Image: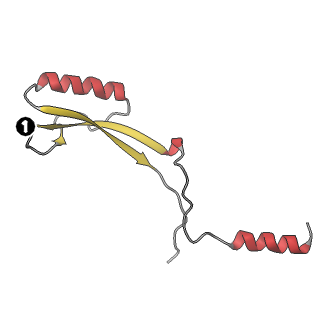
Amino acid sequence: MDQNQRRARIIGMRKTPSHPRTTSPDPDQTRTTYFIQSRSHSGAAWEPASGVRVSWESKATALERLAARREMQPAWEHRLMERITTVTEQPTTEH
């Protein structure tokens, strides 16, 4: 590597993008959890189901809990929700 190539490499290393790169999320950095919401009638707001564990990582387990909730409270409406959490890493300002 000659001197000009070294200079170009050093200058290239010093440059940082002014905006973060947009990339597809790494599957290892994405996490899905499931939880139940309930409401007493169709005009009511959806709320977290009381008396149950907050969330489950297994959809099969969450579906079992949803079925149990529906059996326990047949007059209420219940739905399964999923929460997808993605971790994004990017440079930050030093100010």
Classify 23 as above or below 68.
Answer: below
Question: Residue 89 location, x and y as percent?
Answer: 52, 57
Q: How is the image coloured?
A: secondary structure
Question: Residue 19 location, x and y as percent?
Answer: 55, 68
Q: Residue at x 18, y 33 (%)?
A: 78
Residue 91 is left or right of residue 83, and the answer is right
Residue 87 is left or right of residue 38, and the answer is right
Q: Residue furthest front?
A: 42
Q: Residue at x 36, y 38 (%)?
A: 33
Q: Residue furthest bottom?
A: 95
Residue type pointed to by label 1? His
Question: Residue 64 location, x and y as percent?
Answer: 27, 23
Residue 69 is left or right of residue 7, and the answer is left
Question: Residue 63 location, x and y as percent?
Answer: 29, 26
Quarter placement of the N terminus: bottom right
Q: Residue at x 33, y 33 (%)?
A: 56
Classify 2 as above or below 78.
Answer: below
Classify 24 as above or below 34.
Answer: below
Q: Secondary structure at mark 1?
A: loop
Q: Residue at x 25, y 26 (%)?
A: 65
- Mark 1 — residue? 41
Classify 9 as above or below 40.
Answer: below
Picture quadrant where residue 66 is located: top left
Q: Residues within 10 Å of mark 1 (few under 14, many from 20)?
A: few
